[in-house]
Image (cartoon, rainbow, N blue to C red):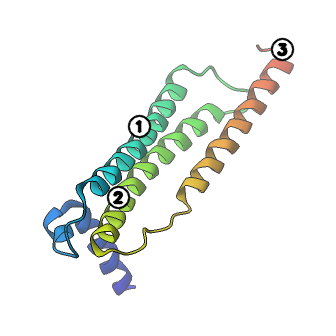
Amino acid sequence: MEADNQHVWHAIRRWFDPQELRSVGTTPDYRFSLANERTFLAWLRTGLALVAGGLATAQFLPPLPLAHLREAIAIALLLLGGAVAVRAIDHWARTERAIRLGEELPASRFPAVLALAVGVGALLLVAAVLVRAIGGNG
């Protein structure tokens, strides 16, 4: 357990210490590092969009047929946005390290998980809208 905690803290420290990242491997072609950075920024935009959607849901979505469904959707979007942001920095650091070491880029299931979460969330919202429309509250 202690070794796992040390591994986690070492990974987090690596996110904020550019000198430690530069101390491994060799300096890559800057275009690869810039492409990695653009990917990181795209993930951050996705996280921000999810957070904005969560705030908009909490503030502007009318009450839904199920009690607290609106709040549950808002919280789910906010948590998903936060998870995307944290995942973005971790993936950026691991990818940059792999580039510098000439290793294979790290694989990730996160894009598929995120896509499924967004798809399931959309289906649940469609169901909520249909229940509201059929129930005569629309």
Position of residue 117 in the picture relative to residue 88 (left or right): right
Percent x, y for residue 99? 32, 67
The quarter of the rendered structure image containing the N terminus is: bottom left
Q: Which residue shows up at 29% across the image and 66% down it?
A: 12
- Mark closest to the chain's N terminus, 3 or 2: 2
Q: Secondary structure at mark 2?
A: helix
Which comes sooner in the sequence, label 2 or label 1?
1
Displayed quadrant of residue 16: bottom left
Secondary element under disc 3, as helix, strand or loop, is loop
Residue marked by disc 3: 136
**Residue lying furthest right:** 134
Q: Position of residue 138 (x, y in %)?
A: 76, 13
- For marks 2 and 1, give the one nearer the viewer: 2
Q: Secondary structure at mark 1?
A: helix
Residue 83's place in the image compared with 54, above or below, is: below
Residue type of the residue flagged with mark 3:
Gly
Q: Position of residue 118 (x, y in %)?
A: 62, 43
Check disc 1 and report the residue beneath it.
Answer: 48
